[in-house]
Image (cartoon, rainbow, N blue to C red):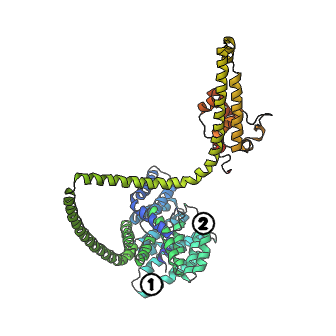
């Protein structure tokens, strides 16, 4: 008989399940939760203290009944003695209310916690006082509590005959649970799954629970119970990895809820022991025992105490082996260190005999080695850049050749202009000289020719620039040069940006505009972007990147 399932029918627990598929990840989460035990304990105590404060300031009997019921639920798997205290208070309030349904529910609480404390006779005595026919809607709960108590008595029976007797009673009440619980209720699902397991039908158990499990809300206390049942179904199927996974899920829930009375962590510890993870198994079984003692869960303490010596002995043996290995390692390390120190001493003596020149040469060699290493690293980076530079060389050759021709033309024109001015000076035509110097026609013609050459060269490098640039703008804001123009001012600004000249001041000097004018042009075109404004110029830089 699955002992945890017997207790689980009435002691449903909350489980905030994290979607983890890897057993090792779950084990790491359990380790971290154990380390942070104080956090979960404080959280539990805070919830209990809030309920106690509410009870202290409440005078309405119905409210007192509800609060003591909640306090019983909080203490049930946390501190059994305190749970018994509040179960009795809840019972007294129910008697005063003269409400048979509340009274029977309070008796169920008493029977359940008495079973946890090993007070089987007292629990059965209370159970026998319940007239369930007067509250037919509680028949499912009545059979569930009866099943738990007789199951616990079977687990703790001193003879096989008594054990079988109590097991039969427990199964009888379990079958009654299935009859009286609504077929779509969680208690019904749990009882039915246990029936499948008891009748060696793990596939039916999984077919029932695996589709149902995701439907349970993360704050529903039944998630941990169902995950444990699933682990037992996989155990019957001899699927050890899945069994360990679902046991880990259930154990993690118990620890996060600061429960002290549980079975999952103990079962997981035994699996880890069998897998050879002795240290973790010892940590888990010791934590299980400490919690069972704090909770005063006598049956769990007894069960754990039978397993603890086995795991503890292996843990001690492992520690002894580790200690021996550590001593061996430290001894070997000490001998090696002594040898190294001796060699170091001899080396220092030898080095003192070297001349200063040789010492300087050694230092120079060290620096040369460092430089060689840096050079090798640089060469590797340079090799990576070669492919990019090869493609860029094509553009640079065109660009440089065009502007060398341009510079040559400018030098010729400057020479011709100088001769013209010289003639004016030598012939005494001072007025013509002054008019020639003041005239802007020459500069304007040269600028016009310079921009025309720039446009021609740029469009030779990026023949589809205008089309690709307009593709970045909203359709109604596209730019087309006037007839006779290759590029207009807006296109020329972004042509310079495409060539890597992004500074507005430099662009202003190049195009002979003010910096504010260039800035306004750039801002206006960004506002016309078909895409995000901040990405516009980055996309301009990508124009023609696939063109060689």
Horizontal side, residue 228 vs residue 333: left or right: right
Q: Quadrant of residue 273?
A: bottom left
Closest to the observer, 153 or 215: 215
Q: Is residue 53 above or below residue 324?
A: above
Horizontal side, residue 432 vs residue 301: left or right: right
- Which residue is the extreme one toward the front? 426
Q: How many marks?
A: 2
Please state the horizontal and vertical placement of residue 127, each as a whole percent of the image: 48, 73
Please state the horizontal and vertical placement of residue 232, each as a whole percent of the image: 51, 77
- Residue that carries the numbered disc 2 in the rendered image: 214
Mark 2 residue element: helix
Dot 2: within a 10 Å radius of its alpha carbon, few (fewer than 14), some, or many (20 or more) residues? few
Closest to the observer, 244 or 441: 441
Closest to the observer, 497 or 440: 440
Marker disc for residue 163: 1
Q: Is residue 181 visible?
A: no
Q: Residue at x 73, y 36 (%)?
A: 487
Q: Residue at x 58, y 50 (%)?
A: 389
Closest to the observer, 242 or 434: 434
Q: Residue at x 51, y 59 (%)?
A: 97
Mark with earlier residue (1, 2): 1
Q: Residue at x 60, y 52 (%)?
A: 390
Horizontal side, residue 441 vs residue 308: left or right: right
Q: Is residue 510 above or below residue 255?
A: above
Please state the horizontal and vertical placement of residue 260, each as a whole percent of the image: 41, 66
Q: Is residue 21 visible?
A: yes
Dot 1: within a 10 Å radius of its alpha carbon, few (fewer than 14), some, or many (20 or more) residues? some
Q: Nearer the viewer, mark 1 or mark 2?
A: 2
Mark 1 residue element: helix
Mark 1–mark 2 CB contact (< 8 Å): no
Task: Report, in whole angstroms, how far the alpha carbon at label 1 lies from the one at label 2.
Answer: 36 Å
């Amino acid at each position: 008989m699955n002992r945890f399932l017997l207790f689980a029918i009435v002691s449903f627990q909350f489980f905030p399940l994290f979607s983890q598929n890897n057993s090792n990840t779950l084990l790491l989460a359990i380790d971290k939760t154990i380390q942070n035990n104080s956090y979960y304990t404080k959280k539990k105590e805070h919830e209990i203290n809030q309920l106690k404060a509410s009870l202290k300031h409440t005078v309405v009997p119905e409210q007192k009944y509800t609060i003591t019921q909640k306090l019983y639920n909080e203490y049930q798997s946390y501190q059994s003695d305190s749970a018994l205290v509040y179960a009795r208070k809840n019972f007294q309030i129910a008697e005063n209310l003269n409400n048979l349904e509340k009274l029977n529910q309070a008796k169920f609480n008493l029977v359940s916690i008495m079973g946890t404390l090993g007070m089987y006779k007292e629990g059965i005595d209370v159970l026998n006082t319940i007239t369930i026919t007067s509250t037919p809607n509680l028949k499912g709960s009545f059979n569930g509590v009866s099943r738990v108590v007789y199951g616990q008595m079977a687990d703790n029976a001193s003879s096989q005959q008594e054990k079988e007797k109590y097991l039969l009673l427990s199964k009888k009440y379990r079958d009654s649970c299935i009859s009286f619980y609504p077929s779509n209720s969680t208690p019904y699902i749990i009882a039915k799954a246990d029936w499948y397991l008891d009748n060696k039908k793990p596939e039916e158990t999984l077919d029932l629970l695996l589709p149902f499990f995701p439907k349970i809300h993360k704050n529903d206390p039944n998630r941990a119970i169902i995950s444990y049942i699933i682990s037992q179904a996989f155990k019957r199927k001899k699927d050890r990895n899945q069994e360990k996974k679902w046991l880990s899920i259930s154990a993690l829930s118990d620890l996060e809820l600061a429960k002290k009375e549980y079975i999952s962590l103990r079962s997981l510890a035994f699996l880890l022991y069998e897998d050879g993870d002795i240290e973790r198994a010892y940590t888990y079984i010791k934590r299980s025992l400490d919690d069972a003692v704090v909770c005063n869960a006598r049956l769990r303490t007894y069960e754990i105490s039978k397993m603890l010596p086995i795991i503890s002995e292996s843990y001690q043996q492992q520690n002894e082996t580790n200690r021996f290995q550590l001593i061996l390692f430290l001894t070997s390390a000490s001998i090696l260190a002594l040898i190294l120190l001796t060699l170091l001493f001899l080396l220092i003596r030898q080095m003192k005999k070297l001349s200063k020149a040789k010492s300087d040469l050694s230092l120079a060699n060290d620096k040369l080695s460092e430089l060689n290493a840096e050079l090798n690293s640089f060469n590797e980076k340079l090799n990576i850049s070669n492919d990019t530079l090869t493609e860029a060389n094509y553009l640079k050759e065109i660009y440089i050749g065009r502007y060398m021709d341009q510079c040559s033309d400018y030098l010729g024109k400057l020479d011709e202009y100088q001769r013209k001015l010289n003639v004016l000076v030598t012939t005494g035509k001072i007025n013509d000289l002054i008019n020639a110097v003041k005239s802007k026609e020459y500069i304007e013609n040269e600028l016009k020719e310079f921009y025309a050459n720039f446009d021609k060269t740029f469009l030779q490098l990026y023949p589809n620039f205008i089309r690709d640039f307009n593709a970045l703008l909203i359709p109604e804001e596209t730019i087309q040069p006037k007839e006779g123009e290759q590029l207009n001012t807006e296109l020329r600004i972004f042509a310079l940006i495409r060539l890597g000249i992004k500074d507005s001041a430099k662009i202003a000097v190049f195009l002979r505009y003010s910096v504010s004018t260039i800035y306004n042009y750039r801002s206006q075109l960004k506002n016309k972007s078909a895409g995000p404004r901040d990405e516009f110029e980055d996309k301009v830089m990508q124009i023609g990147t696939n063109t060689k």
